[in-house]
Amino acid sequence: MDKNALSAGVAAAAVALSLAPAQAADDDTLERLGAFQTTGTTDFITVEQNGPAAEAIRQTLQRIRLPEGFSIELYALVPDARHMAVGPQGVVTFVGTRKKEVWAVTDRSKNRVADEVKNFAPSLAKAIPNGPCFSQDGVLYIAEQNRVLAYPAAEFFYESPDVVAVPVIAGGELIPEEFVSYNHTARVCDVGPDGKLYISLGQPYNVPPEEHMETFNEVGIGGIIRVGQDGSGREVYSYGIRNSVGQDFHPETGELWFTDNQVDGMGDDIPPGEINRQTAAGQNFGFPWYGGGDVRTNEYKNDEVPEDVVFPVVETDAHAADLGMMFYTGRMFPEEYRGGIFSAQHGSWNRTEPIGARVMFTPVDAEGNVTGDTVPFAEGWLDENGEYLGRPVDVAQLRDGSLLVSDDLAGALYRISYREPAQPDEE
């Protein structure tokens, strides 16, 4: 057994042992919540929205560069803010983390700045609840490290510490426990036009050993799985993905698009990051034979590549770490942005010259064709000294058509809005 495999095995065993008592207690809590019984939990964690931290972030936002007519403001202080789900009624936005909390962010006064940020469902323990998403009828789903829960009517019952939670995929059944890892475990989810739930499952390795590939393909590790909203009919929808942490469905074609983070350790400038378009179930997007784009991995360079590999529709800067993405369907922004992709680049972690920490835009037409280059839309969180002042993770659209951006380094949500530039008076 190689060193990486041994380390992964030891880590998985330690996680399993440490979680056993907690899992039993958690199952009991789920049973009580499902029976509409109280747990005795009364306390919330409330995040103060003013003070030095907020002022420091506002100072950083003054350096962010945007196209003419756009502005960016602090929307909320949200610790470790990752992926977001805006409630269909526009009441509350749920924000996942890679730690233990999901945050409920509320703008009660509707002045486009959050009034309250508190933890959601504090009576229920959570493990890396990174990926919240909503169904059209208002059911909140949260994809955790190794579990998916549904919270019916969460947008209306989040004021209580006890909220009904129903297992969609029970604890320990999203992936086999022996492959639970600290690496690439931030799940994202979306409910597709077919009403089914799509969940990404990142690889626990930089490049997986060949002996695990059969199991990974069966389970959907290194892919995207599709299940009914009740957890039935699980299938692997997408193959050949290293670590996708951003997905959305094209508003016209209904096709699934997703970002993918590519192989580390191959150099500063290869392989490229990816935005992918999936046109049919079961397509293969080339990993681990390709590390990104058409760049072959060292580990699989001599292996025969499947004939049906689908290459990305967009190649992005190497190691910029493309995470959350969404198609813009609002009316606030100018026409050229409508139907296009906004995506968040978290920024490189081991590149000699750092890159990323920005929001990108990719124009896409109604037929799903990319019609221009992917270009920076909001940038400036990476300063002239190579220091990260923030690291964008996800993008989401508010009902007024403005754009929310999450930042897990600063612990904040930003709101980007547009106002038509004033025209000079005619002489």
Image: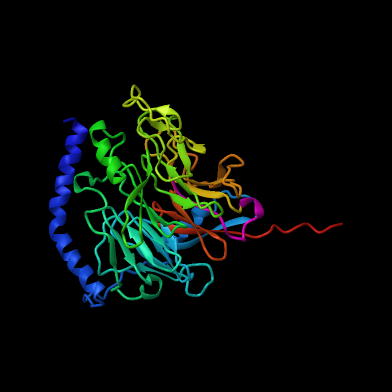
Residue at 43%, 33% (x, y): give it. 308
Q: The magenta stretch spans which residues?
A: 322-337
Q: For the N terminus, which image quadrant?
A: top left
Residue 192 forms part of the magenta stretch: no
Place of residue 362 in the rendered image (x, y in percent of width and height, measured from the top left)? 56, 45
> Is 233 positioned to the left or the right of 155 in the image?
left
Residue pushed farthest front?
A: 233
> Is 60 positioned to the left or the right of 36 in the image?
right
Of 344 and 412, which appears nearest the observer?
344
Q: For the C terminus, which image quadrant?
A: bottom right
Residue 333 forms part of the magenta stretch: yes
> Is 164 positioned to the left or the right of 280 in the image?
left
User: Does residue 342 appear in the picture of this structure?
Assistant: yes
Residue 143 appears in which quarter of the rendering? bottom left
- Here the colouring is rainbow
> Is 423 positioned to the left or the right of 191 in the image?
right
Q: Is residue 370 above or below residue 81?
A: above
Please give the count of numbered marks on the rendered protein: 0
Residue 353 appears in which quarter of the rendering? top left
Of 309 and 320, which appears nearest the observer?
309
Residue at 35%, 70% (x, y): give it. 152
Q: Is residue 3 above or below residue 278?
A: above
Residue at 33%, 24% (x, y): give it. 303
User: Does residue 204 appear in the picture of this structure?
Assistant: no
Place of residue 350 in the rendered image (x, y in percent of width and height, measured from the top left)? 37, 35
Place of residue 178 in the rendered image (x, y in percent of width and height, measured from the top left)? 19, 45
Residue pushed farthest right?
A: 427
